[in-house]
Amino acid sequence: MPRETTAEKLVRMTEFERPLWDAGLRVCGMDEAGRGPLAGPVSAACVCLDPDKTVPGVDDSKKLSEKKREELYERILENASYVRCVFRDARTIDRINILEATKRAMEEAAADAPECVFLIDAVTGLALPWRSESIVKGDARSHMIAAASIIAKVTRDRFMLELDERYPMYGFAKHKGYGTSEHIAALRKYGPCPEHRRSFLKNILSAEVL
């Protein structure tokens, strides 16, 4: 089977956007990064790219190399008519749970968006200023959601690099807070730091440590 070209990918990835653009509507994509890690914030991004400002090569952030994500991140920022990324920290995640923290981050990221249709990766039940559509696996099917996934992922990864400087014993620069064997070994040796999600550690550490 021939490999998909960049132009073909752009056509496929704007399947949801094109009818809206044709109707004269703006489109914003929304996605999150960091729902699964044991440490660090959850990150949510909202991105609006006009039809003549799409960024070829944009795809689900999980499918891209770190170098490619960084390159596309800069190009998205250069071309976006609206972009905002919001965090909810570990304490908030522990207090209201990861899904609610994700929703609140998404709502804040979208709060100042221009009138548009929001395309959202899977999450529903958001209080948004304009109409929205939730798309299952949207980060692999929508250009705008994929762009938001890159902004959310790169912004969070950069923050985790900063945390690595403050807490070098955990290896955040390498695993970005996910539950790798190296990370779990460090948790058991050093205990959690303020950036760890206590509610995620109940099966790893004893109640006395938490």
Image (tube, rainbow, N blue to C red):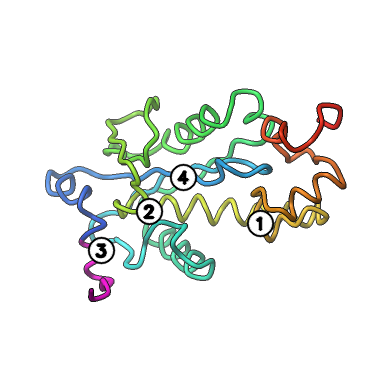
In this rendering, the label closer to the viewer, 1 or 4: 1
| Pair 3/1: label in front | 1
Q: Are marks 3 and 4 in contact (CB under 8 Å)?
A: no
The residue at which mark 4 appears reads as: 45
Please tell me whether mark 4 sits on a helix, a strand or a loop.
strand
Q: Earlier in the sequence, mark 2 or mark 1?
A: 2
Distance between mark 3 and mark 4 Cα atoms: 20 Å
Residue at the spot of label 1: 175
Residue in the picture at 71% in, 34% down? 203
Element assignment for label 1: helix
Answer whether labels 1 and 4 touch (C-beta < 8 Å).
Answer: no
Provide the residue designation for mark 3: 10
Task: Name the residue beneath numbered marker 2.
Answer: 146
Residue placed most toward the observer, 45 or 24: 45
Left or right relative to 26: residue 111: right
Whole-percent x, y for residue 39 in the image: 68, 43
N-terminal label among 3 and 4: 3
Magenta part of the protein: which range?
Answer: 1-11
